[in-house]
Amino acid sequence: MLQPTPFDVAIIGGGVVGCAVARHLTLAGAKVVLLEKATDILSGASKGNSAILHTGFDAPPGSLELACMQEGYQEYIDIRTRLRLPILETGAVVVAWNDDEAGRLDQIEQTARNNGISDVRRLDRNELQAREPHLSAQALGGLLVPREHLIDPWSAPLAYMLQALANGAEIRRSTELLSGQFDGRDWRLATSTGELAATTVVNCAGLYGDIVDERLTGQTHFTIKPRKGQFVVFDKAAARLLGTIILPVPSERTKGIVLTPTIFGNLLVGPTAEEQDERDRAGVDTATLESLKQKAEAILPALAGMPVTAIYAGLRPATERKEYRVRHDVEQHLITIGGIRSTGLTAALGLARHVGRLWASSNAHTPLADPVWPEAPMLAEHEERDWTRPGYGEIICHCEMVTRRELEAALDGPLPAGDIGGLKRRTRAGMGRCQGFNCSARLASLTEGRFPVPLAVGHCHD
Amino acid sequence: MTEPTMTEPANPLSVDVAVIGGGPAGLSAAIELKRRGIGQVVVFDRDVEAGGVPRHCGHPPFGLREFGRLLTGPAYARRLVRHALQAGVEIRLNHAVVALHPEGHLELATPDGRIAVRAKRVLLATGIRETPRSARLVTGTRPVGVINTGALQAYVHLQGMIPFRRPVIVGTELVSLSAIATCLTHGMRPVAMVEARSRPTARWPLALLPHLVGIPVHYRTEIAAIDGDGRVESVILQKQDGERTTLACDGVLFTGGFVPEASLVRLSHLTLDAHSGGPRIDQFGRCSDSLYYAAGNLLRAVETAGWSFREGRRIAGYIADDLQGSLAKAERLIPIVPGRDIKLAVPQQIALPGLLAGARTIELRVEEASTGHLDVSSNGRTLLRKPLSALPERRILLDLKALGLLDDATEIRVEMRP
Ligand SMILES: Cc1cc2nc3c(=O)[nH]c(=O)nc-3n(C[C@H](O)[C@H](O)[C@H](O)COP(=O)(O)OP(=O)(O)OC[C@H]3O[C@@H](n4cnc5c(N)ncnc54)[C@H](O)[C@@H]3O)c2cc1C
Ligand SMILES: Cc1cc2nc3c(=O)[nH]c(=O)nc-3n(C[C@H](O)[C@H](O)[C@H](O)COP(=O)(O)OP(=O)(O)OC[C@H]3O[C@@H](n4cnc5c(N)ncnc54)[C@H](O)[C@@H]3O)c2cc1C
């Protein structure tokens, strides 16, 4: 029987890391396939995060995490115009709210400088108030990190994947990796939609990283311990109350609760850090959301009475250890990018380069001479959105100003939205203050017959 | 925050009155303005059709007082639009107002590009919406099938689709009952109705509806959690005493909890009233920028279409007076301050001169059921005290005339007392 030519690389998982790896290896000249078990990409850890492009000022010095964050940061800046990806240059301030925290700012500043972030600067109480006049007067001062910025957490990975696809990669969604056999040269992978062969496997399975390693090799070198983070998103009217990301003085376990503008023009508070066993379900709860709201109001008293637009939760693929769990099994042609806990949005492009180097060390390849650069949807509030250009047809979602043209584009093309979540992430439809009061029926009709979980369950005759 | 780069259209469109929102309030105002001889009156609506919320309320009762007959929402909306067009009102659809500026300067999005409008006066009539699950901070996963009544009505009446078959309905307002009617007539069977209060919010005998059709109503009960991975699979109900039960269902309908659609106001130079959630107005419907007026449900949640219609017409009269030079400029403003148990007061201030030349009543609502005396005072002096038993979401009208001349009042305090 004639075997089809194996792919050079099979990537397991379409989170931000898998998408970035797919892009990088495709541009490096590899024939890539990405397998994603969900109906759309970005359905795992990458579904809900704080969307901060981190400098790495507080990352463990000398770590792979720091290196990947810094490399990823730089590459984002380098490629973002060509992929039409936005950035909201806010800067961040680590704010001290008591003397103990104020005392720890020195240490944080030192780490930042050691990590090569030399533009950090202390702000005294007055400088801080001058920069953020609505900030609570309780703030004692802080450390300004000028290059902590905000990006679009969904359009960025989507753009990476779109570029991979435009340059020859393939994607198989609703395709779960079940098991694998390595024959000394290639992998034969069994998936929920059939078999395929690939020379190298890159495990980017996020919250399932340990399970995928086990399915491939019968063993795993780490254990995922999902850590939930809940968020509250305030109305767009809140955005003018704050221009800078407000970070707490971090603890060992978490970066702590952040109050930040978003690239979509809202204000966001979160995330919490809650250990749980479940890898799929990220629920929210009233008491925690209330406390987040209170926390936000304590930081920014003018937020009192501000309407809440949205609530959500994300799961970090944390492990029993703090660091990234990256492993290259040269013999078995297996690269595992595991435990990309809380900095993966920033580090993804850097991790992809890291994978590229590991892969290139044992695979001959010729980078694409003249790759295609597709453009991502532009959803940033401070950029020209689609509705500002004539010919959009109709605005379907008024809260987020989403046009019919944008929705049709998101349901079309090489990577159409695979479920309602994917459509929201590609367009923001239904993510605004009315949460679909006005537009969900239109969305139901526009997406009829497309999604495995449809918005409407049937028809009626009026 | 960086503002979007505004490519200013060269020639702003100049109009006498720009009405934002073509629901009952906006359309009736526009008709009245034309009747009063105002030149160019343009209604801008962001939707594909005018008529506002009644467009997707496929049920009566609408129009009894305006048109002397009982109409369904869509029929009522069509009739309103027809009257407006006959009166010479220009209606521009697919025109979303995206920003309000001083001097009657508006920014709009249209499918042909952005436009700017310069209006001598602006009437805001952007209506209301319901409080979604997110703003209620409800526990659980976030599956498909959790919506508001407005969306349900649009599924059924505009798209011919149904969003679920066995929903749990949260709330017992009037709109919750209309949701039951919509469900039952379109192949959906609500499995239960849930109300946090100890009694229905809607009036008797309407509140009997769920009992008549055999839908269990759980009072003093809240949704403790929503569960489901793709679509809603169940909810956990929790009674005030802590008792929990799981109920299988395939949707959750959050009804009511109306809030003014005041985003434009919130993002503008106009003052917002924290109590009502709408713009702050005086008895003429004038906002903090006196070129701007507001009417309809935007002022407070929630009134009937008929009330909004009449309010729009009345406030249009003041706008016409204003344009024709017969409305006095405010020399002094007396704020009306909601005190104990009072949720909101509309208008929020009385402009002098003209005490009785505008709205003759102040509209009040209570937060929760309250019995005792309504106490109206000014600078510590009682102006009025009357027994009152009030329920939430019901309008209470306070007669301005009964308060005296208010010549030396600097504020009017309204509160419930034992
Ligand atoms: C609350 C929170 C806040 C955060 N804030 C930030 C921030 O501000 N800045 C920042 O840089 N980072 C942030 N992060 C971190 C970032 O979101 C994560 O590091 C990143 O999303 C991890 O991506 P991933 O691709 O490794 O995993 P995932 O996104 O989980 O992707 C893995 C994919 O693999 C798929 N999969 C699993 N098993 C299989 C299988 N057997 N077969 C096929 N497919 C499979 C899954 O469906 C999933 O789509 C935050 C994270 C959280 C949770
Ligand atoms: C589900 C439901 C059922 C109801 N049932 C009944 C009933 O049976 N009987 C009854 O009397 N009342 C009923 N009501 C109440 C009634 O619909 C309202 O009282 C009435 O519609 C209020 O009129 P309005 O003009 O203030 O606002 P709306 O009718 O809400 O109209 C507002 C208009 O403004 C437009 N708009 C908003 N923002 C912008 C913008 N930025 N730019 C341009 N246009 C904008 C909207 O598109 C809309 O057309 C119901 C309401 C709901 C939600």
Image (cartoon, coloured by chain):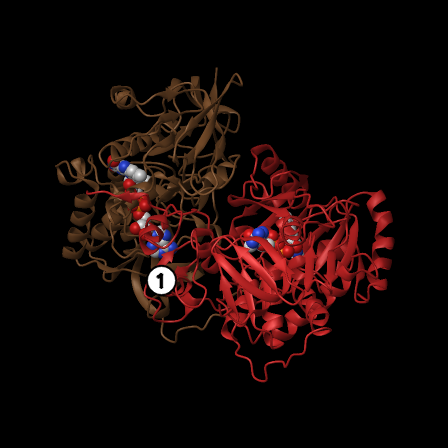
Q: Is residue A301 visible?
A: yes
**Quarter-wise, where is residue A84 in the image?**
bottom right
- The quadrant of the rendering that contains the C terminus of chain A is top left
Rendered view: B60 above or below A241: above
Seen from this angle, which residue lies furthest front? Answer: A1
- Nearer to us in this view, A362 or A320: A362
Residue that carries the numbered disc 1 in the rendered image? A404
Rendered view: A267 above or below A100: below
Q: Colour of chain A?
A: red
What's the residue type where badge 1 is placed? Arg
- Residue B61 image position (x, y, % from top left): 20, 34
Chain letter for the brown part: B
- Residue A387 image position (x, y, % from top left): 41, 65
For the point 53% across and 72% down, which residue is it? Answer: A5
- Nearer to us in this view, B89 or A434: A434
- Nearer to us in this view, A310 or B286: A310
- Nearer to us in this view, B213 or B269: B213
Rendered view: B223 above or below A37: above
Rendered view: A273 above or below A109: above
